[in-house]
Amino acid sequence: AQLLSGLTTGVAAGVTITLTLNGKSYTTTVGADGKWSFDFSSAALAGLKDGNYQLTVKLTNQDGISVEKTISVLVDTTPPVLTVNKLTGDDHLTGAELKAAQALSGTGEVGLTITITLNGKTYTTTVGSDGKWSLQLPAADLALLKNGNYELIVTSVDKVGNQTTVDHQISVD
């Protein structure tokens, strides 16, 4: 669901406002305080594919004067692209590799923050203009890892809240 609201001036309470999106019209009314709102249901938005749409808001006041405003609405439900390369080339850390910082890298959507969690510690980096990201996992943190399997949880969230999470398995031996 998505709430859309506005404020009118010089318009009587009860005047109908018509909202048109993707060829479908919806109505609401102006309140005594001049405010109006309309909650687009999930069902009303379900048929919209990613892209730009024109939303028209129109009212005709008590004097017969019509006012119309069209705004552009972006629908974005696509999660960001996110890849994670193999840590140390094989996702397996040896005793020697635990003693040095290790580079973790991958690809993502330019400018987005990448959040990495390993063994309860969280690290962040940003995807560069080339679509690549990288981060050095500190030797002091790697040294705390015992033999076994661990999850590197790598997450990216775009500007509208779409999220991609990769659970990347590594092992220590």
Image (cartoon, rainbow, N blue to C red):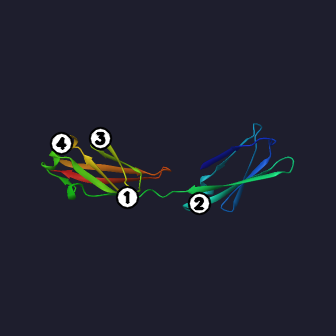
Marks 3 and 2, the one that precedes in the sequence: 2
Question: What separation in Å lies between label 1 and label 4 (alpha carbons)?
Answer: 30 Å
Q: Secondary structure at mark 3?
A: strand
Q: Amino acid at mark 3?
A: Lys
The residue that mark 1 highlights is: 131
In the picture, measured across the screen, residue 57 lies left or right of residue 107, that is: right
Please identify, in this view, whether the residue under mark 1 or under mark 3 is nearer the observer. Answer: 1
Asked if labels 2 and 1 touch by Cβ distance under 8 angstroms, the answer is no
Residue 143, disc: 4
Marks 3 and 4, the one that precedes in the sequence: 3
Residue at the spot 63% in from the left edge and 47% down from the top edge: 3
The residue that mark 2 highlights is: 52
Please identify, in this view, whether the residue under mark 1 or under mark 2 is nearer the observer. Answer: 1
Residue at the spot 80% in from the left edge and 41% down from the top edge: 10
Question: What separation in Å lies between label 3 and label 2 (alpha carbons)?
Answer: 39 Å
| Residue neighbourhood size for the residue with mark 3, other residues' Cα within 10 Å, grouped as few (<14), some (14–19), many (≥20) | few
Q: Amino acid at mark 1?
A: Gly
Q: Residue furthest left?
A: 96
Question: What separation in Å lies between label 4 and label 2 (alpha carbons)?
Answer: 49 Å
Q: Secondary structure at mark 2?
A: strand
Question: What separation in Å lies between label 3 and label 4 (alpha carbons)?
Answer: 13 Å
Q: Residue 123's spot in the image, x, y percent?
A: 32, 44
In the picture, measured across the screen, residue 157 lies left or right of residue 134, that is: right
Q: Amino acid at mark 2?
A: Asn
Q: Residue 23's spot in the image, x, y percent?
A: 69, 62
The residue that mark 3 highlights is: 121
Please identify, in this view, whether the residue under mark 1 or under mark 4 is nearer the observer. Answer: 1
Q: Residue 116's spot in the image, x, y percent?
A: 32, 47
| Residue neighbourhood size for the residue with mark 4, other residues' Cα within 10 Å, grouped as few (<14), some (14–19), many (≥20) | some
